[in-house]
Structure formats: structure tokens, C-alpha cells
Amino acid sequence: GENVEQHPSTLSVQEGDSAVIKCTYSDSASNYFPWYKQELGKRPQLIIDIRSNVGEKKDQRIAVTLNKTAKHFSLHITETQPEDSAVYFCAAPSYSGAGSYQLTFGKGTKLSVIP
Amino acid sequence: DGGITQSPKYLFRKEGQNVTLSCEQNLNHDAMYWYRQDPGQGLRLIYYSQIVNDFQKGDIAEGYSVSREKKESFPLTVTSAQKNPTAFYLCASSIEGSSYEQYFGPGTRLTVT
């Protein structure tokens, strides 16, 4: 099955600085890479995703980059704000038999933005 | 935050009792999932269902059971065989399989003593 490793587990940045979170995956057939944000006490929500036919995707202050050769993808948050403080999860799908795919999540990165 | 609901928000049970967690969605999604969230462990897949009357085990299915008799409902039973049931349980759904956005419910925090 898929093995997804996420680093760092915690990250503190000053407001206005950039934050980068990295994930590696093992299944070379994986073709979809979402990032979820979970604020304290709330449900995870998708913030950005990328498919394997592109190398980068941006949405305002958030971007995701994908390196299929090296099997890693990264989340980039620029001009961080206190409301960016949350736990971020990466994920990658893996084939689980009988035509089914399941998402494997990283263990999460707790981002703290210091005002 | 509508679309997918879980009840109750908090649940307390004595050891040795089975307990069923509810998950309902009105998004007309085919696929539904159950995850367990423990501190520092991320989201671990318990069971998933891609279509009514069909479901597959995830990575940590032991001690759990599910049913999918209706498209909008995917209840999870935590049995007495689950050795460490105290956790935060999240239900999710997606249009189809895992290559599409998953929408999560608000979660149920289960405490077994």
C-alpha cells in the first residue's frame, strides 16, 4: 500500500513569512494529491489539490508543487496570517484491490503563525 | 457546514459495549469513508464504501463493522473487540472514489471507560 510521510510535524513562522510543508509518497501510480486544513475543533477541509499531469498549482497565497520523479509534493503558503494556524494534512491515493483506491494521509503538520 | 452530518458529537460508553456512530450525507455522493484520528497519527482509514451494499476494509478495520444499505447512510459500529476504541471518528464522502474531494462530517468523539 501507499506510504505517505509528511514533514515537519510542527512549524512556527512569523506573520508575513512563508511556510513550506513537504510530503513523500511511495506508490508511483498515485495521480492525485490533495491538501487538507483542519482548524482546532473543526473538520478537515480541502484547500488545494493537484493531479499528476501538472507540476504546480496556485490559489492566491497557497500553492502546491509536485515532483513525480522524486515522488514528493509540497504545500507553500506565502504571506502567512494568524488564521493560517491549523493542522495541515497531505494525502495520496493507492490501489487497494478490486478496482478500488483509497487515500492515505500523512500524519499532519501543526502550523503556528505568530503575530 | 451542511451536507454531511455525524451524531452524536460526544459519546461515552463502558468497556465491553458495542456502540454505533451515525453518518448521513445529502450530497448524493456514491463514496463514503470512516477515519479514526488520534493525536500525532493523522487520519487512518477504517472502512470505505464506493457504492450501496458494498464496502471494503481500510488499514485499521479490526474491531469495527459497517453497513451501507442506503446511499446517504454509512453507520460505523465499534465493537467490544476493538482494543483501544477511545478516539475521534470522522466520516467523509466523495462524488466517486479517492481521486475526488472528500467532504468531512464534524466528527464524533468516543470515550470508552
Image (cartoon, rainbow, N blue to C red):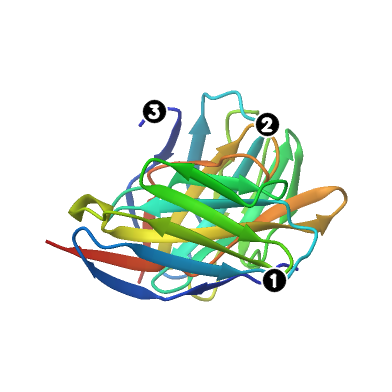
Quadrant placement of the N terminus of chain A? bottom right
User: To which residue does mark 2 refer?
Assistant: B30
Q: For numbered disc 1, what is the local secondary structure?
A: loop
State how far apart marks 1 and 2 are (Cα): 33 Å
The residue at 19%/55% (across/down) is A82
List x then y, in percent, for residue A96.
Answer: 79, 58
Q: Do labels 1 and 2 share a chain?
A: no
Locate residue B92 relative to residue B70 in the image: left or right: left
Q: Hey, what amino acid is under mark 1?
A: Ala
Q: Hey, what amino acid is under mark 2?
A: Asp
Crowdedness near tag 3: few (<14), some (14–19) or many (≥20) residues, C-alpha within 10 Å: few
Are circles 2 and 3 on residues that touch, CB within 8 Å?
no
State how far apart marks 2 and 3 are (Cα): 17 Å
Locate residue A87 relative to residue B18 in the image: left or right: left
In the image, A63 versus B50, the foreground residue is A63
Give the number of the mark in front: 1 or 3: 1
User: To which residue does mark 3 refer?
Assistant: B2
User: To which residue does mark 1 refer?
Assistant: A70
Crowdedness near tag 2: few (<14), some (14–19) or many (≥20) residues, C-alpha within 10 Å: some
Q: For numbered disc 2, what is the local secondary structure?
A: loop
Give the number of the mark in front: 1 or 2: 1
Locate residue A54 relative to residue A29 in the image: left or right: left
The residue at 73%/33% (across/down) is B52
Mark 1 falls within which chain?
Answer: A
